[in-house]
Image (cartoon, rainbow, N blue to C red):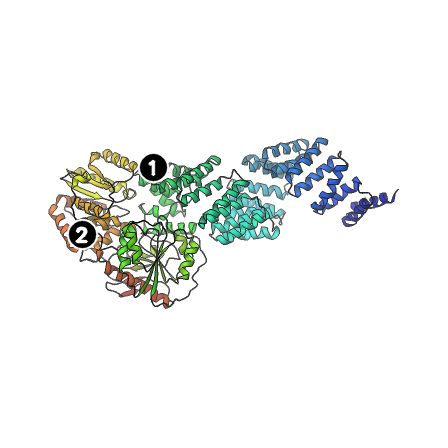
């Protein structure tokens, strides 16, 4: 026996004795003497594989198969090594060579199947696993691996059956319990999935993938703190598990901790650059941050690595929608739905685009489809019902309203708060709705303001709005902004929307000491700007309305944050300190239904501009298709405010009063058709409802109010700016006092202008009062005269006085903050600076109840 042969035999002896270190040295010594020794090459490969030193092993096995091409075992081992090194295509070639030499080895079929899994060729993988099982009916790993393929193909029942076979053969196979948990997770059977993951971990506590699975379940259940803890367990065991970093990123994204989310996604991509879902996550973060170029780049990367990932097209659609590039948004959503027809979020996106375009009829179908696919998809149920209200489609209206209210009561964020305002509900329900929405859309953020007390010579107030343009909110507020006392207040406008060339835009820009165009700023940038400017009081003029930027306020950039005017209800958020109101819109006994502390202004909460122009020329009725004689009931509210119950009253009035007509602001064409049909169904000629076309100038719109006899208010959502328009134009407004802020606004206006007799407290009295005034022209004429007399003498349209009251409110808030006192209820009395705080009671405004002899 040669010396080399003796060394080789000693190496085998050491290998059999489990002395891998000694065996490695001896085999390498053999190869120094005889580089082409096939046995030493193969056995040294086995040792290095056992030690998981695959890169070194690859060098020796490569040499072995070049010398001896007749060993299926060598090709098999080479395939295993290449798979471990992530070189799947090369591994496939080696397994093919092994099977070409010997097709009866079940392990080779199984391992080739795992390579097909890696290559996402799941059908071919299943074929190989079935071949392995045909050779060995008790081959546990093949059943488990087949389960993975079936899971990827979304053949979940078959996958569960495969894992069941594996576990029947080997109940303690932790990987099979892991796989079962993954299938159950995909089926949304979360409790069963957790049980499977727990079983896997009981058998194998260091199985990082099972911790990952648990984290994914907690993420879906919105148990975000539990998810983060569980992901940390996985990373402690396997720091290079890219999918765990992906999971962390997803949770941090849900929590709106965007910087941390991007860091987690980047960590995942550093470990696995082709992880499409991590690129998707980055895109979603940048979309939220309004960094749209970066978002598009991330979505493009997603599609490179996973072209069939519908969610990337969904993300693109969302960005295009934000950019108001609606045709491209439709195209992106269509691509998403072509790949995944059941993607409810893409249907929702299509509905949102149609809604932005005011194509309400077209919006209904995608909203309906989204709701059918995912009944609890955030906001969808309310969006669908709101669209039906926009087009005056009242089929199943009461049932659907009741269901939406029930959803809110059952803690489901199924509607945006604004859409919920038009539903007959209570202040308690609206508070619950707002809280649910804030928890879902605006989770707690770290406060930017850290408790500093600014000491400026003037109080710094900033107003945030996307509506600093020709918009009802600006029509109401521009006079107030012009009247602010610049010796006491340093006032800033932060404009969140596009400008226009309107006269009111120019007035707005001139009225503020600082006017900042922040339309393209991220929420973070706006919040940091407010902090840098050391704003004392920041006023949100939008709340939950369209194009609002509530995310700015979640970051708490200012010591005092106020909800005012744009959204007639509570924000349900702990980061909003005050709501500006009056004792009509928020009765003292209902203020616990508001998360904010209530600031009671003395007359009405609503500002008005006493400089508003009304065209002097009185138009003729014929100019607006109105009959020259007869009684004109007017209601210029948006169509979604016209509830069936109110409409029933209006039509009964027409039926009882000959030669009367109903004059409405013209809505979308579908609403026009539906309203005419509803009139006809109630036995009245549809021609007795006339729609007012939009006129270019607001002063002309105000002037035509004088052609009507009585403005009829809506309920549960009153006229707001439209009621103010009517009163300013000299047209009496009849209202019914509702339950919520949105349903009590007109009562506030009527009280402030000294016409409480036009406030009724029941719909029955509302109907009777309307008929009484229509049949008693002298009574109505007296009310019109009283309105004319009060118009410039009562507080409602006294812009200077109103501004003094709101400034007194700001001063009271500021004084509490400077005194290190928490926010509290504030009552501003008529006359500048007369303020009370806390629970001290004041007189209640009275409501004149109308009664008739029956």
Q: Is residue 533 above or below residue 733?
A: below
Badge number at residue 757: 2
For image coordinates 30% across by 52% down, the residue present is 505
Residue furthest out toward the left: 778
Callout 1 touching callout 2 (CB < 8 Å): no
Is residue 838 in view from this perspective? no
Between 445 and 312, the one nearer to me in the picture: 312
| Residue 67 position within the rendered picture, expressed as x and y whole percent measured from the top left | 77, 37
| Residue 535 position within the rendered picture, expressed as x and y whole percent measured from the top left | 37, 62
Few, some or many C-alpha atoms within 10 Å of disc 2 (few <14, some 14-19, many ≥20)? some
Query: According to the image, label 1 marks what residue?
Result: 361
If you read the primary sequence from the N terminus, does the residue marked by circle 1 or circle 2 appear first? 1
Quadrant position of residue 393 = top left
Q: Is residue 337 above or below residue 790?
A: above
Q: Quadrant of the C terminus?
A: top left
Please indicate whether residue 612 sits to the left or right of residue 580 in the image: left
């Amino acid at each position: 026996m040669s010396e080399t042969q003796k060394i080789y035999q000693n190496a085998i002896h050491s290998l059999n004795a489990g002395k891998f270190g000694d065996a490695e040295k001896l085999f390498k010594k053999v190869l120094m003497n005889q580089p082409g020794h096939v046995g030493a090459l193969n056995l040294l490969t086995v040792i290095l594989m056992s030690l998981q030193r695959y890169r070194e092993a690859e060098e020796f096995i490569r040499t072995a198969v070049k010398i001896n091409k007749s060993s299926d075992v060598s090709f098999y081992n080479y395939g295993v090594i290449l798979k471990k090194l992530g070189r799947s295509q090369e591994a496939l070639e080696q397994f093919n060579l092994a099977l070409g030499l010997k097709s009866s080895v079940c392990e080779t079929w199984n391992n080739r199947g795992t390579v097909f899994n890696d290559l996402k060729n799941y059908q071919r993988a299943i074929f190989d696993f079935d071949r392995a099982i045909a050779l060995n009916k008790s081959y546990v790993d093949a059943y488990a691996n087949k389960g993975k393929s079936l899971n990827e193909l979304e053949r979940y029942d078959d996958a569960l059956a495969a894992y069941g076979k594996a576990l029947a053969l080997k109940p303690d196979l932790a990987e099979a319990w892991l796989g079962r948990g993954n299938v159950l997770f995909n089926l949304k059977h979360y409790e069963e999935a957790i049980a499977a993951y727990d079983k896997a971990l009981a058998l194998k506590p260091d199985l990082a993938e099972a911790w990952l699975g648990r984290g994914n379940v907690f993420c879906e259940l919105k148990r975000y703190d539990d998810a983060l803890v569980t992901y940390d367990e996985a990373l402690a065991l396997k720091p290079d598990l890219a999918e765990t970093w992906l999971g962390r990123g997803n949770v941090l994204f849900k929590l709106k901790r965007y910087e941390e989310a991007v860091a987690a996604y980047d960590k995942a991509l550093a470990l696995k650059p082709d992880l499409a879902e991590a690129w998707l996550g980055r895109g979603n973060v940048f979309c939220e941050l309004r960094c749209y170029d970066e978002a598009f780049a991330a979505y493009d990367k997603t599609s490179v690595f996973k072209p069939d990932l519908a969610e990337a097209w969904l993300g693109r659609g969302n960005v295009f929608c934000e950019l108001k590039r609606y045709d491209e948004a439709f195209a992106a959503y269509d691509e998403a739905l072509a790949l995944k027809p059941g993607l409810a979020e893409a249907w929702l996106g299509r509905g949102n685009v149609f809604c932005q375009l005011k194509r309400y009829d077209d919006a209904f179908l995608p909203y309906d489809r989204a709701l059918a696919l995912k009944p609890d998809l955030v906001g969808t149920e309310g969006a669908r019902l709101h669209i039906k209200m926009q087009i005056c489609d009242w089929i199943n209206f009461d049932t659907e309203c009741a269901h939406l209210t029930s959803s809110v009561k059952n803690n489901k964020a199924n509607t945006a708060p604004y859409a919920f305002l038009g539903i007959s509900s209570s202040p308690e329900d609206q508070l619950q709705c707002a809280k649910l929405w804030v928890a879902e859309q605006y989770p707690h953020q770290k406060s930017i303001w850290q408790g500093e007390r600014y000491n400026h010579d003037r109080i710094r107030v900033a107003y945030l709005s996307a509506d600093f343009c020709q918009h009802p909110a600006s029509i109401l507020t521009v006079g107030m902004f012009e009247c602010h006392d610049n010796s006491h207040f340093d006032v800033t406008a932060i404009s969140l929307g596009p400008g226009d060339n309107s006269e009111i835009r120019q007035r707005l820009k001139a009225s503020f000491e600082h006017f900042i165009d922040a339309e393209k700023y991220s929420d973070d940038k706006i919040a940091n700007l407010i902090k840098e400017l050391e704003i004392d009081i920041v006023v949100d003029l939008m709340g939950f309305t369209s194009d609002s930027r509530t995310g700015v306020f979640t970051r708490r950039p200012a010591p005092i944050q106020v909800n005012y005017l744009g959204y007639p209800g509570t924000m349900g958020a702990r980061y909003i300190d005050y709501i500006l109101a009056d004792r009509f819109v928020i009765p003292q006994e209902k203020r616990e239904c508001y998360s904010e502390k209530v600031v009671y202004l003395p007359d009405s909460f609503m500002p008005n501009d006493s400089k508003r122009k009304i065209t002097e020329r009185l138009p003729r009725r014929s100019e607006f298709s109105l009959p020259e004689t007869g009684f004109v009931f007017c209601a210029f509210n948006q169509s979604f405010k016209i509830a069936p119950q109110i409409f029933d009253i209006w039509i009964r009035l027409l039926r009882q009063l000959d030669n009367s007509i109903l004059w409405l602001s013209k809505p979308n064409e579908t609403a026009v058709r539906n309203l005419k049909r509803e009139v006809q169904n109630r036995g009245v000629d549809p021609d007795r409802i006339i729609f007012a076309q939009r006129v270019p100038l607001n002063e002309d719109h105000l002037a035509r109010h004088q052609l009507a006899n009585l403005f009829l208010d809506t309920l549960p959502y009153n006229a707001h700016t439209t009621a103010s328009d009517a009163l300013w134009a000299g047209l009496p407004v009849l209202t019914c006092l509702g339950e919520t802020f949105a349903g009590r606004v007109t009562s506030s206006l009527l009280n402030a202008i000294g016409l409480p007799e036009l406030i009724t407290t029941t719909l029955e009295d509302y109907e009777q009062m309307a008929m009484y005034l229509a049949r008693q022209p002298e009574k109505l004429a007296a009310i019109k005269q009283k309105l004319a007399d009060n118009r410039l003498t009562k507080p409602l349209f006294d812009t200077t006085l109103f501004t003094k009251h709101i400034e007194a409110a700001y001063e009271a808030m500021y004084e509490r903050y400077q005194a290190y006192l928490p926010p509290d209820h504030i009552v501003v009395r008529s006359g500048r600076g007369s303020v009370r705080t806390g629970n001290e009671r004041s007189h209640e405004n009275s409501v004149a109840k109308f009664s008739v002899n029956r």
